[in-house]
Image (cartoon, grey):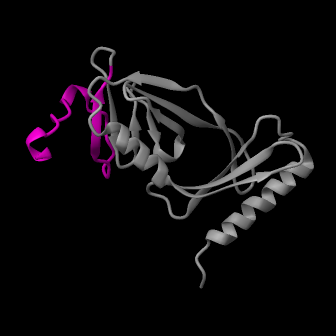
Amino acid sequence: MSWLRRRPKLPASLRPALGPEERVLAWAPVSSPDGALVATNQGLWLPDGKKLGWHEIHKAAWSGRELRITPAEVAEVRDEYAVLIDGPAVSYLLLEPGELPDQVRTRVTRSVAYTSHHPLNTGGVRVVGRRVPGHDGLSWAVRYDSGTPVQLPAVVELTGELVSAAQGATSPRD
């Protein structure tokens, strides 16, 4: 009987400037006046008008009332991959969350095609291949554990080898 409890349509005043291939999947008003979080097939629109692609969200946590989003920020671009760090987390109180938290969790999880963690002598590194809407292949990135000497030449070289191995493991065979 869920069809009897249809979610109200997103008001035009809250609708972000969607791209030509973009469609709204879910939305929820936020506690601030005249704001909404809007999930589309391409990403999450924040109340301030900024959009995070699903591949740009490092963490999303739902407490039952609050959605906390931690975006990934590029700290460095190397030959075959980017080095990511956590951006500033943002939290939104959702009194009527509807399908939004589930869509966020599903879409962020679905964007991850490959992930593996590798301990190093000091610290460790996670190699991640993510799907990016509208792009062929995977976007590759690494996230270092706290305390890892990320600029040490041996760590940079080993990281490159780990990313290359992951790319080889996920490439289609001819």
In this rendering, is residue 167 above or below 127? below
Indicate left or right for 137 with 120 as reference.
left
Q: Position of residue 169 (x, y in %)?
A: 66, 71
Quadrant where the C terminus lies? bottom right
* Residue 132 appears in the picture as rendered: no
Q: How many marks?
A: 0
Q: Residue furthest top?
A: 33
Please name the residue shown 38% across and 29% down the image: 64
Please name the residue shown 32% across and 22% down the image: 30
Indicate left or right for 116 with 40 as reference.
right
Q: Position of residue 55 (x, y in %)?
A: 52, 47
Q: Position of residue 65 (x, y in %)?
A: 37, 25
Please name the residue shown 35% across and 44% down the image: 103
* Residue 86 appears in the picture as rendered: yes
Q: Position of residue 167 (x, y in %)?
A: 67, 66
In this rendering, is residue 102 above or below 61? below
Indicate left or right for 78 with 103 as reference.
right
Indicate left or right for 36 with 67 as reference.
left
Residue 41 painted magenta: no
Residue 26 painted magenta: yes
First to last magenta residue range:
1-30
Please name the residue shown 90% across and 44% down the image: 152
Q: Residue furthest left?
A: 4
